[in-house]
Amino acid sequence: MLEPASKGGLGISTEAFGYIKGTLGLIAVIAGNIVGGWMLSRWGFRKCIWWFAVILVLPNFLYLYMAASTVSMALVTGFIFVEHFGNGLAMMAFTLFILLVSRGKYKTSFYAISTGIMGLGMMIPSMFSGKLYKFMGGSYITFFLVVSIASLVTFLVIPLTYKIDKIKEADKLWEENKTLIAGD
C-alpha cells in the first residue's frame, strides 16, 4: 500500500495508511466484534459461521482487485474497513468456538492455548508473506491470487465444526432458548 504505483503499490502516504488501518481499522474490528456477538446470540453458531467466513475471505479478493486495477482512496478505505470488520466477526466466532469446546478440568488452559494458536494463525502468515511475495517475482497480482485461492480452504474446514458435540449441544440449547437469548 505504501509502495508507489510504479512498483505495483497504491502509493498511500504513511499518515493516510496509519489513519485507515489504525483508527478506522480499530473501529471496524470493534464493530465486527459487537455485530458478531449480536448475530451469534440471535441466530446461533451454525447459521452465522458461513457468513462470517465469507466476510473473512472476501478481503483477499478485494486486495487482488486493488492489485490489478487503479482504485480510489475511498475504495481502499472501504476495502480495509471490510477486512477489519471481517476480522472482528472471525474473532468473535473463534472466541465462541473456544468457549464451547473448552470444557472439563483444564478449560482455562485449553482456552489460553487456543487463543495462542489463533495468534500464531495471524503471525506466521504475516512473517512469510514478504518472502512469498518475492518468491512470486514481486507481483502483487500473483501474490493476492495465490492468497485468495488458499483462503478458500476456510470453507472446507467449517463443516468439520458441525461434528463437534459441544457445538451441536450449544446450537440445540440456543434453539430451545432463542427467545430468551435474542429477546424476540
Image (cartoon, helix red, strand yellow):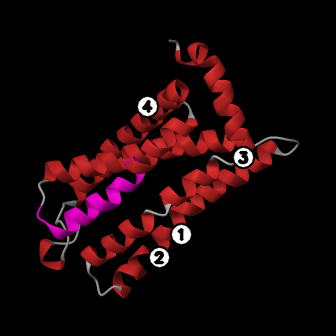
Q: Mark 3 belongs to which amino acid? A: Tyr
Cα separation, mark 1 vs mark 2, equals 7 Å
Asked whether, in this view, residue 3 is left or right of residue 176, the answer is left
Q: Residue farthest to the right?
A: 105
Quick one: quadrant of the N terminus? bottom left
**Could you tell me which residue is drawn at 72 percent across and 54 percent down?**
113
Mark 4 lies on a secondary structure that is: helix
CB atoms of marks 1 and 2 within 8 Å: yes
What residue range appears in magenta? 55-70
Crowd tier of the residue under label 4, counting other residues whose Cα lies within 10 Å: few below 14, some 14–19, many 20 or above = some
Disc 4: which residue: 35
Disc 3: which residue: 111
Q: Is residue 184 above or below residue 146?
A: above
Q: Mark 1 belongs to which amino acid? A: Ile
Q: Residue 59 lies in what quarter of the image?
A: bottom left
Q: Is residue 10 above or below residue 80?
A: below
Cα separation, mark 3 vs mark 4, equals 22 Å
Cα separation, mark 4 vs mark 1, equals 27 Å
Mark 1 lies on a secondary structure that is: helix
Q: Mark 2 belongs to which amino acid? A: Phe
Q: Earlier in the sequence, mark 2 or mark 3?
A: 3
Q: Earlier in the sequence, mark 4 or mark 2?
A: 4
CB atoms of marks 3 and 4 within 8 Å: no
Q: Earlier in the sequence, mark 1 or mark 3?
A: 3
Q: Nearer the viewer, mark 4 or mark 2?
A: 4
Where in the figure is residue 115, as x and y percent of width and height?
Answer: 64, 51
Q: Is residue 61 inside the magenta stretch?
A: yes
Where in the figure is residue 108, as x and y percent of width and height?
Answer: 78, 43
Along the viewing direction, whichever of 133 and 149 lies nearer the viewer: 149
Cα separation, mark 1 vs mark 3, equals 20 Å
Disc number placed over residue 124 in the picture, else none: 1
Q: Is residue 84 above or below residue 31?
A: below
